[in-house]
Image: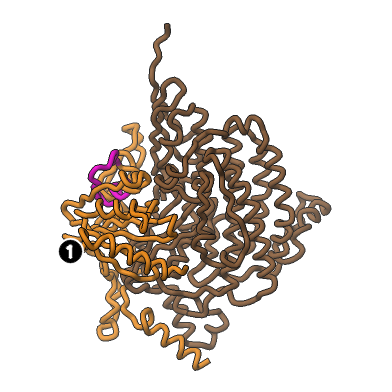
Chain colours: A brown, B orange
Amino acid sequence: MAEIRNYTLNFGPQHPAAHGVLRLVLEMDGEVIQRADPHVGLLHRGTEKLAEHKPYNHSIPYMDRLDYVSMMCNEHGYVGTIEKLLSVEVPERAQYIRVLFDEITRILNHLMWLGAHALDVGAMTVFLYAFREREDLMDCYEAVSGARLHAAYYRVGGVYRDLPEQMPRYEMSHLGSEKEMKYRNQAREGSLLDFIEDFTERFPGYVDEYETLLTDNRIWKQRLVDIGVVTPERARQLGFTGPMIRGSGIAWDLRKKQPYAAYDKVDFDIPIGSNGDSYDRYLVRIEEMRQSNRIMKQCVDWLKNNPGPVMVGDYKVAPPPREKMKDDMEALIHHFKLFSEGYSIPESEAYFAVEAPKGEFGCYIIADGANKPYRLKIRAPGFAHMAAMDEMTKGHMLADVVAVIGTMDVVFGEIDR
Amino acid sequence: MSIEDKLDDLEEALEEQLEENHEECKWIRANGELTLVAPREQLLAVMQILRSHHDLGFEQCIDVCGVDYAAYGHSEWNAEDAPNTGFSRGAERETVTDFQAESRFAVVYHLLSLSHNVRLRVKTFLDADYPVVDSVTGIWNGANWFEREAFDMFGILFNGHPDLRRILTDYGFIGHPFRKDFPLVGQVEMRYDEDKGRVVYEPVTIEQRTLVPRVVRHDYRYEEGRELVKEEEQADG
């Protein structure tokens, strides 16, 4: 009889299903996991320490690089904390714009998750479909901020600028035909809001397409049902948030429970799971995309009818308009001080959290009266989820590790910070 | 129920539960948040009450983080006396040594009660020479990695932690990078050595630059005066 031995298996950091730079040391009994020890930190850049050496505003772009598939939600968490410390009232229009872009970000993130998760489990098609829609949403990012990923669009006191009147269009080049250009520019004739409205009309149909591919798919269900089950009690114990805790049947969503920005003025539902397995978390996230779509629609309606400022008029934290600087000495001084030294926050501390697509993303800032944070702690949802890796994979097969990584929706930018 | 009402209730519950055995615990209310400062000997007992008593019911430990207070309030550029003396151009960057050793470090816990929908911050101060505190992993299993991170970054030790290893830094890393006396550029740099055929570590050759100096301002602009300025502006315009 052959001798049965225990193996220690290194999974990653270059494994394609390791979602970046996860290194998992797995102790296996045959093909069954006995202990999973995630080694994280390969992407550690010391964001928090860097932020301590920079004026408050300079760290906003670092936030984009934390969870690099839900950029604007991270920015929201950071600027929200500073606004709390300074008691800045954000104009209503800016709040609606933030809600709109938080939801665009949620869809962006969930599409990325869906595509990668399905790819890990063996379905290539969904990935290609998901990226088709991500393209449209990243065009929205580009239209408002000039960058497709690292937007730095949210600023303390509002957003960088108002939504553009004209959605950027494709230009004719020697590569494409006129007919093709016409087709690609179809939805881009009007403003950005028209483009988003058109997207919200189309999007539920796309979600139906993904569901046709996956929801009742025999292989998909075999791979996800009863994999990585987390009971509600364990979900609370382990500090789960976002879709991970909702998949376990706890209706906890900061957008509803502790509303920020304009979330108390829009109408949406929180989907929850019943079994706490990977399949439930899949269903929760799919439904969240539909709900995000609903919120986006309401925001577009409101934004179309309510023009107004998108930045506070307090020049201690927000730059004065360029025209004003031409004939107002005060404005010029404000501009100079703001961009050379920044603003100081009096001695205080605050924690502010947003419902990022992955869960609770919070920033804890200790200010000591200087123009730089004394301590910035970023609470990333993925960090708490990753810590539960051992518990969620114990007793499962090696192939299920991949499904569990997928269902956690981990991104190492935020885990390693 | 507004946040303020909830905090009132929470304060009441805290008073009731902590007055008997834990009268050294104090709480501060600011920015619509409640911070409970507990001495480190009592931390575990207090946390147990916070977790299990039904009036408090903090089921989730959202975050644990270390803080190094060594350079608190330290300015690299003296702005207070500048109107009389004029500005110097250079930013001073000397290691701060005049910190209070008995409360150099702090561990900050952010707790969340799902049933009462309220947050609480718990803070405990640790001394510079022997920063040890009891681990709360037995109460909230999710605190495990957060405590490992605080150990890695600040060298704070957690008594009773099941697996206190480094987590974010490199294998074989020396030092605790988030301490205020650890330079931003680090201590060592790494390169591949052709001759030795392996990666070697050497002391850093780059110099730390200060692009914008750290300036502490106790200016009227940022405190009560802010309201005044706004009112004046409105009156003008």
A314 vs B9, left or right, is: right
- Residue A271 in the image: x percent, y percent? 59, 50
Q: Residue furthest right?
A: A179
Residue A17 appears in view: no
Depth check, front residue: B38 or A324:
B38
Mark 1: amino acid? Gln
Q: Nearer the viewer, residue A42 or B3?
A: B3
Answer above or below: position of A148 versus B147: below
Identify whether A61 is placed above or below A345: above
Give the residue drawn at x 49%, y 26%. Answer: A397
Q: Secondary structure at mark 1?
A: loop
Q: Quadrant of residue A279?
A: top right
Which residues lie in the magenta part? B148-165
Question: Is residue A236 shown above or below A125?
Answer: below
The answer to which of B82 and B110 lies nearer the viewer is: B110
Q: Residue at x 35, y 41 (%)?
A: B191
Which residue corresponds to the image point at 44% horizontal and 82% vertical from the top-left?
Answer: A333
